[in-house]
Image (cartoon, helix red, strand yellow):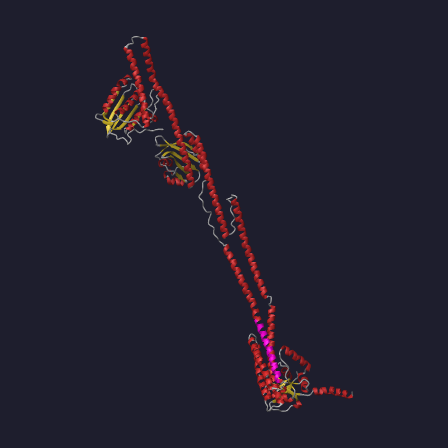
Amino acid sequence: MKTLSLMLLFTVISFPLWAQRNVVLIVNESNPISSLSAFQISEMYLKKNRTWPNGEAVRFFDRSDESIERKSFLSSILRRSSRELEQFWIGQKLYTGNSAPSQLSSDKMTFALVSRFPGAIGYILEDNFLENKGIKKIEVTGTP
Amino acid sequence: MKSQEPLKRSGIFEEKSSLVQRLRAVMIAVSVFILLGFVGMYLTTQPFLSTLKRMNAANITMTSISAALDSLETAEKEIEALPDAKLTKDVRFVFFEAQKLFKTSLETAIKHSGKFEKIPESLKLSVKSNEEFVKNARLVLKHAADKNKIFTKEELAAEILVARQYAQETRESLRHAFLLTKDNSDDDFKYIYAKRFQPILAALVISSAFLIFVFIFGFSITNRLRRALRNLSMATGEVAEGNLSYKAPILNEDELGHLTFAFNDMTEALQAQKDNLQTTADRIATLQHITGLFSEALTPKEIFSIIVDQGLKAVGAQASVIGTVSEDGNFLMIQKMEGYNYKFEDTPLSSPLPMAEVVRYGQPIFITSKEDLFEKYPFLIGNTVEKLAHAIMPLQVGSECLGSLTFSYSQNKSFPQDEKDYLIALTRQSAQALHRSQLFDDARQAIQARDEFLSIASHELRTPLTPLKLHLQGLSRTVKKEQDVPKEKILTIAETCDRQVTRLSRLIENLLDVSRISSGKLTLNKETFNLKSMIEEVVRHYADQLRNVETEIFVEAESGIEGFMDKVRIEQVLINFLTNAGKYAPGKPILIKLTKSDGVAKLSVKDQGPGILEHDQARVFERFERIKTGENIGGLGLGLYISKQIIEAHGGKISLESEIGSGSTFITTIPLFYEEPTNPNMTAGRFL
């Protein structure tokens, strides 16, 4: 009982902590973009903007639903809940045919796919960012 | 009585409109309406057809896209399941089979999506994405099948993710295309739904317009037809009941109007024919009536009255005059006139007036107006002409013209042929009636003359017989009474009886001559003799008788005149002249003259009697005619008649010159050598 309480307390206390864990947006290194606003990122994620300024197709790679990266991304940049997104994508599928971005299970996959597609964009925890051939980090400005 | 006017059409009907053309126009309009209906239906349904085609294409596209999505999903699942698949080749097989289906479906979708905007673009994007998918899938399959297992599971998983990314993009493009297609289809459906009543409305509008048109024009035309036919039907009924004057109203100037006009024309013609027939019947009845009146009339005077009085009524004239040819054939004697304000005078037949002209030429004259009169008879210009139109007709019986009959009118008249025929028929009837009355009159006069003659003859014959009988009875009594009757007394009585017998014999001989002349059996026994000798012989023979009445005879005769004649008959003529002179101029000298000129002997006997009136001069040569002088002069009145016949039988002429108080001269001119006509017998002379 005590343990449970403590754990619960810890979760409640730590929520904002993990919620506040930063994610970094990574793009293919061939992408000339160096920064994007949160709004722009949101637009891309929600597939409202599907093309980079250089004409390359935007391919946003998401993370698994329960992953910390995704939670952090949703809360810090997208500012939407997973439930909201779920409903959004149901609607999108019905009315635009768009489906949610592919979900990747790991940073490695994220790196592999972002470096694979010139127009790819993904996110990882800032802490886990490693300089990698084929990808680069972009700055996120503003809030959605 | 009205005259028959020539049948004529009341006019020419001009068709200003045409029912047939109107009906044709209606038929054309109906055809146009039907065509418009078809066109309208086509035009209003064409968008629907196009839209339905689009919707059909959309359906096929959506179906194909759905099939493609299913195939893509199948292919993607195979690739996704590849790491766990036992046999790569199975995965490959299913994958590529799915891809075949995908391609087929996509091709179908692309084929039917051409009508839509953006959809083909999306489909092309899906094709491109799918190519990438297949390309990466091949890579995955290849790496998966790699027995050497160069690639790690993570690498393979990454490649699968890459392939799946492309598959997802393909799917998104397909879904996008599907949704676009659906939207288009929905729009089309909305469009059709929104305009679903359009064809019906168009059909309703066209049908309504057509019905209104048909109603208006059809009603108008049928109404027009109905009224016209009803009028014609009524007119036909009226005509069938005998009302030929009924005129059907002409309502329109089209074929029906023309038919009505022709119908009215026909009834008018029938009416005119009926009137003509009635007029003819009336005229025939009138002629029959007048003929009946003629049959009851005996004398020319009665005939004249009937002709003028009844004729005026019969022909509708205002005046009439009838004249007959005189006995000498030189004058037209006016017998009766009615309705004129002036008196017609007896006219010489040589006159240029139409009354005389018709007698001369035997042809009727019809004068239609005053102008026509002056044109034909310019010498009448300036005269007051009372009446305007005249019908002057000869009273002709066979080849003989008895006179002329004139009807005059107060108005101008055209005298159509039927009226001329009627007038001529009436005149012919009148002429025949007049001729019969003249024959009757002549017969009556002849009977009267005969009676008179019988009276005279019996008296004249009795005159010598009575003293003859008395003398013979006296002689008989004397012989009975006296034994010796003196010879002188007997001689005296005998001479007296002889004279009476001679007188009686002469009278009977004259009667026989008249009979011979009448029957044409008076023959001439011609011989050549000296005329002077014949005269002297006659004078010698009658000198004693005439001396008793103290009448001296003087003879002035040329010698050497010989002629081939009947001597006895010529003597008879001379004796007649001398006997008359002795009767009418007793005690006065008688002069006999004989001359010759150009083969013709002229013998005249002049007395100094009282003379003969001019109007009696022609009469003295007629039978049984005697001049009444107040004295009782005997005789049958046959001497001069017989003398005239004898002289004319010799080819000669006999005439009389006389003045009252200066005596009379009887003149004969006789060809000395006369060739008789083929019939050697003397002509019978005027015979009633």
The relative height of residue B411 versus residue B99 in the rendered view (above or below) is: above
**In the displayed image of the protein, which residue is found farthest to the right?**
A1
**In the displayed image of the protein, which residue is found farthest to the top?**
B483
The relative height of residue B637 versus residue B42 in the rendered view (above or below) is: above
Work out which quarter of the rendered image holds the C terminus of chain B and state it: top left
Across and down, in percent, residue A44 comes to 62, 83
Q: What is the chief secondary structure element of the magenta stretch?
A: helix
Given residues B590 and B454, the one toward you in this image is: B454
Note whether residue B656 is visible.
Answer: no
**In the displayed image of the protein, which residue is found farthest to the left?**
B560
Range of magenta residues:
B53-79
Note whether residue B297 is visible.
Answer: yes
The relative height of residue B440 versus residue B225 in the rendered view (above or below) is: above
Across and down, in percent, residue B555 comes to 24, 22
Identify which residue is drawn at 53% across, 52% down. Answer: B225
Given residues B627 and B438, the one toward you in this image is: B438
